Structures are given as C-alpha cells and as structure tokens.
Image (cartoon, rainbow, N blue to C red):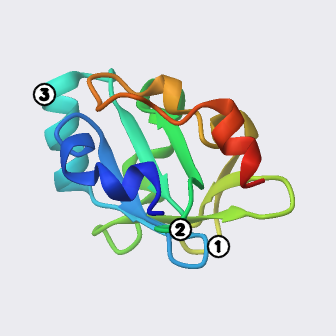
C-alpha cells in the first residue's frame, strides 16, 4: 500500500512543500520555498517523504526550521540540500563543508502538523504496525 504522502502528494503540495528523499538525501529550492512563504508566511510544513511504499516521512513546520533556509546554506545559489542521519534522525543541511543540524525524531511521521490535508491521517497504531 502506498504511503499517505505518496497517495495525497498533489493535495498536500497545495499547502505544504513536499519533496522526496533519495537514500535520505533531500533538496529544497529557493523559488519554490519563496512561493510558500509568500502564500502562507511561516504557517506551512516542509515534508520529506522517505518512502513511497510505507509511511516514513519527516513533517517539519517551517517556523521551526526557518533558520535552516538562509542564503549562507544555499548550495551554488540554487538549492538547499541535506540528509537525514539514520542513527538519531537528525536533519542536516550541508552546504560545502559547513552545516546546520537539528534532531528531528519528534517530526518523524508527525502528520498532526499538517493543515488542510485529506483525512483520515495515519493513526499512531497504523504507524507502529510498520515500525
């Protein structure tokens, strides 16, 4: 069965910036992020979908991660890229040799942060079934 994010990606993307992680690496682009900031201020989420087959996503409220998205962390002035460390679920932006990092286990499958999305959201019992 496809993940909630995969199933509802088009509807989610109307209100939240959705990206897909490849081997836990992800990208966010300034022009697209600016669109969400213009439309929603900091009241939207950055969604990193880590699997198309099961619910494995990081739901990051932008207001909690706004400090990650500064020009200093842009890679080649084109994108922010980073990865999720599997050992402790830390989100890390990695421009050049510098970096910015935050533990993110509380944002793993945190579907309750999403506003204006299709219901029902995956329940904690559903999520534990696949853990």
Residue that protrudes farthest toward the bottom in the picture: 23
Label 3 element class: helix
Against 106, residue 116 (above or below) is above
Residue 117: x percent and y percent?
29, 30
Residue 43: x percent and y percent?
33, 21
State the residue in front, 23 or 74. 23
Label 2 element class: loop
Tell me: 47 left or right of 33: right
Q: Earlier in the sequence, mark 2 or mark 3?
A: 3
Find residue 95 and name its label.
Answer: 2
Number of marks in the rendered image: 3
Tell me: 103 left or right of 51: right
Q: Which residue appears at 58% of the width and 33% of the height?
A: 110
Q: Identify residue for label 1.
A: 97
Q: Identify residue for label 3.
A: 39
Q: Which residue appears at 46% of the width and 31% of the height?
A: 121
State the residue in front, 104 or 37. 104
Mark 2–mark 3 Cα distance, whole angstroms, equals 27 Å
Residue 106: x percent and y percent?
71, 33
Mark 1–mark 2 Cα distance, whole angstroms, equals 6 Å
Within the image, what quadrant is residue 75 found in?
bottom left
Against 125, residue 42 (above or below) is above
Disc 1 crowd rating (10 Å Cα; few below 14, some 14-19, many 20+) is: few
Q: Earlier in the sequence, mark 3 or mark 1?
A: 3
Pointer 1 and pointer 2: residues touching (CB < 8 Å)? no
Label 1 element class: loop
Q: Which residue appears at 64% of the width and 41% of the height?
A: 126
Does residue 40 appear anywhere in the picture? yes
Q: Which residue appears at 86% of the width and 62% of the height?
A: 87
Disc 3 crowd rating (10 Å Cα; few below 14, some 14-19, many 20+) is: few
Comparing labels 2 and 3, the label whose residue is closer to the camera: 3
Tell me: 108 left or right of 48: right
């Amino acid at each position: 069965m496809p993940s909630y994010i995969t199933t509802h990606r088009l509807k989610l993307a109307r209100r939240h910036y959705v990206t897909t992680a490849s081997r836990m690496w992800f990208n966010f682009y300034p022009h697209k992020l600016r669109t969400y900031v213009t439309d929603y201020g900091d009241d939207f989420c950055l969604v990193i979908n880590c699997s198309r087959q099961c619910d494995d996503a990081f739901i990051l409220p932008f207001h909690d991660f706004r400090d990650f998205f500064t020009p200093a962390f842009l890679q080649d002035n084109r994108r922010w890229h980073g990865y999720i460390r599997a050992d402790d679920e830390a989100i890390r932006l990695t421009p050049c040799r510098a970096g910015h990092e935050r533990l993110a286990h509380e944002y793993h499958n945190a579907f309750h942060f999403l506003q204006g999305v299709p219901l029902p959201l995956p329940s904690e019992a559903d999520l534990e079934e696949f853990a």
